[in-house]
Image (cartoon, rainbow, N blue to C red):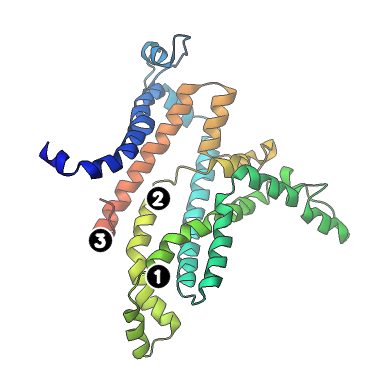
Amino acid sequence: MRTLKDNGTYLLFVLPGTLFLIVFFYIPVLANVVAFQNFQYDPQGFVYSLIHSPFVGFKNFEFFFHSADFGLVLRNTVGYSLTFLGLNFVFAIFFGIVMSQMRSKRLLKVYQTSMLFPYFLSWAILAYFLYAFLSTDKGVINHLITGNGGTAIDFYNNPTFWPFIIIFMGVWKGIGYNSILYFATASGIDPSYYDAAMIDGANKWQQIKNVTLPHILPVATLMLILNIGGIFRSDFGLFYLLPRESGTLINVTQTFDTYIYRALTTTNDIGMSTAAGLVQSVVGAILIIITNLIVRKKQPEAALF
């Protein structure tokens, strides 16, 4: 009680966030029991249905893993996630360092604003922007192709281009936000380190290599640990809204998140959908723990816990 009294003001500040986590994260975790049930909704409410639905063990998981789409979904989810992980990691560090080296504050604000702007646009809006470029009859790209004597491309029925489109759009939208942390870290480095490096005759690349990169390495490692935990997750809007629900693009746009949504809306199988979501969470947690253990041995100051 003495500790609570001495820290009462600080605890009041964290109270709203704590209540938010309890109500919207920890309490809903209990509903994961649906993954082990043949869930049958009853008019008396969700809690009543949760209590009275029969348990089926791991049958929902077996159905999910034995599904004909499981291999495709696993390939797309992990493949895209690893690609995004690598590209975002490299480009975020690159642009963060570049912006930290800029001396013109006005020009820096212009670059920051232009890079951050896409992040605040929803995928629903970006889907229409993309459609303006890729539409078969009205798209800018096809107008250029047909205007030069070529044949229009039906992008929304041609899966060849979509892996590149999705990767480009995903990196482009998030690059500004992802680079902020590295920019802030690089900007906080003591200028005396750079002065000492210049006195020793180091050029700009050598300053970045021997001063900037070592200072942002702990932050980069921490972000890498957190992002590895999301390998089995994907941005729902990117994979569902951009392709405009085109059935011919399923093989290159279907991920765990879109698969769960389609399974829930088409088959109304809540148990299987919950099982798939639980697999995502458990695998993500295991990956974070393993990665953190490796980092803790190699770089203890960057470990998450």
C-alpha separation, residue under disc 2 versus residue under disc 3: 18 Å
Residue 263, by quadrant, is: top right
Which residue is disc 1 drawn over?
Answer: 187
- Nearest the viewer among 68 and 162 is 162
Q: Secondary structure at mark 1?
A: helix
Residue depicted at 44% across the width and 13% down the height: 45
Task: Tell me where residue 240 appears, x and y as whole percent.
Answer: 60, 39
Which residue is disc 3 drawn over?
Answer: 301
Task: Tell me where residue 51 appears, x and y as whole percent.
Answer: 36, 13
- Disc with the residue nearer the chain's start (1 vs 2): 1
Q: Alpha-carbon neighbours of circle 3 within 10 Å: few (<14), some, or many (≥20)?
A: some
Residue depicted at 29% across the width and 43% down the height: 13
Amino acid at pointer 2: Ile
**In this picture, residue 56 sits left or right of residue 69:** left
C-alpha separation, residue under disc 1 versus residue under disc 2: 26 Å
Q: Alpha-carbon neighbours of circle 1 within 10 Å: few (<14), some, or many (≥20)?
A: some
- Nearest the viewer among 19 and 252 is 19
Amino acid at pointer 1: Ser
C-alpha separation, residue under disc 1 versus residue under disc 3: 20 Å
Residue 192 visible in the shown view: yes
- Disc with the residue nearer the chain's start (1 vs 3): 1
Residue depicted at 25% across the width and 57% down the height: 296
Q: Secondary structure at mark 2?
A: helix
Work out which quarter of the rendered image holds the N terminus and state it.
top left
Above-or-below relation of 146 to 256:
below
**In this picture, residue 198 sits left or right of residue 152:** left
Task: Tell me where residue 215 appears, x and y as whole percent.
Answer: 33, 69
Numbered mark located on residue 228 in the image: 2
